[in-house]
Amino acid sequence: MSSAPGTVGGGAQEEDYERAGLAGRLTPGTSPALLLVDPARAYVDPACPLYAGAGAEGAAEAMKELLSVARRAGIPVIVTRVLLRPDGSDAGVFYRKVPSLRAFTAGSPYADFIDGLAPTEAELTVTKQYPSAFFGTALSTYLTSHGIDTLLIAGLTTSGCVRATALDAMQHGFVPVVVEEAVGDRDAGVHAANLFDIRHKIGEVWGMGQVAEYLPRGGM
């Protein structure tokens, strides 16, 4: 069964995954945090090789709305950024595999946060050199020490750092909930395929409306 362009997961695929036992659901807990993964100018500036097009631009606008909702709810907010040494040596093989990561070397304007998505002084900034927000950082310790059991994940890009972070969140014992409208990628088909895979093998994929219903109103 074929799917429409940019979509994955027609009825036959869903049935096949269910038969394979890939239909479990995770119930988010009562202590969530919002994690914005790499809301960097690199993905929304056409002058940058990493520019991810309309998918990233739309996700950035949704991230701004999601960030406002999270702040009103009073939940912890964590924002990640990629920042590398000028020669990229602290990103090792990853830098050799993806030379365009030079956009994130110290001093590059593309490493800056997208306007409206920078964390406040009270919010945590996690600086990383690899795809997952957990790898080589203190994120897991921070979440555990704050009693967090659920991560609402948004950011860029779906197939890269978002997926890697969702996978590590699950492996560290946090329920990952990827917010569908607030993630994006340079290719619609790749984006859809990764959301399909995340939903069946890693965590939950929710729309903005479901997230708004889940979060407390008026602070925690």
Image: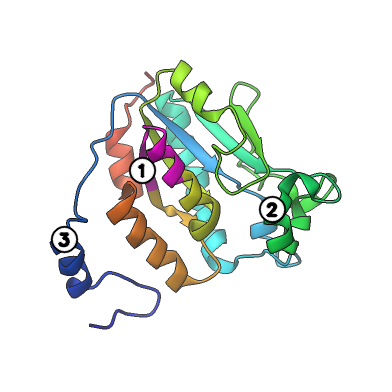
Element type where label 1 sits in the image: strand
In which quadrant is the C terminus drawn?
top left
Which residue appears at 66% of the width and 65% of the height? Answer: 51
Number of numbered discs on residues = 3
Q: Position of residue 178 (x, y in %)?
A: 39, 47
Q: Position of residue 116 (x, y in %)?
A: 62, 42
The residues colored magenta run: 166-178
Which residue appears at 27% of the width and 69% of the height? Answer: 9
Callout 2, which amino acid? Arg
Q: Is 38 located above or below residue 142 in the figure?
A: below
Q: Point out the residue furthest to the front here.
A: 93
Q: CA distance from mark 2 to mark 1?
A: 24 Å
Q: Nearer the viewer, mark 3 or mark 1?
A: 3
Q: CA distance from mark 3 to mark 1?
A: 20 Å
The residue singled out by tag 2 in the image is 41
Instruction: Using the image, tell me which numbered label, if any, was put on residue 18.
Output: 3
Q: Is residue 118 left or right of residue 172?
A: right
Decide which of tag 3 and tag 1 comes sooner along the chain: 3
Q: Nearer the viewer, mark 2 or mark 3?
A: 3
Residue 218 lies in the magenta-colored region: no
Crowd around label 2: few <14 · some 14–19 · many ≥20 (10 Å):
many
Q: Is 95 located above or below residue 189 in the figure?
A: above
* Depth check, front residue: 74 or 37: 37
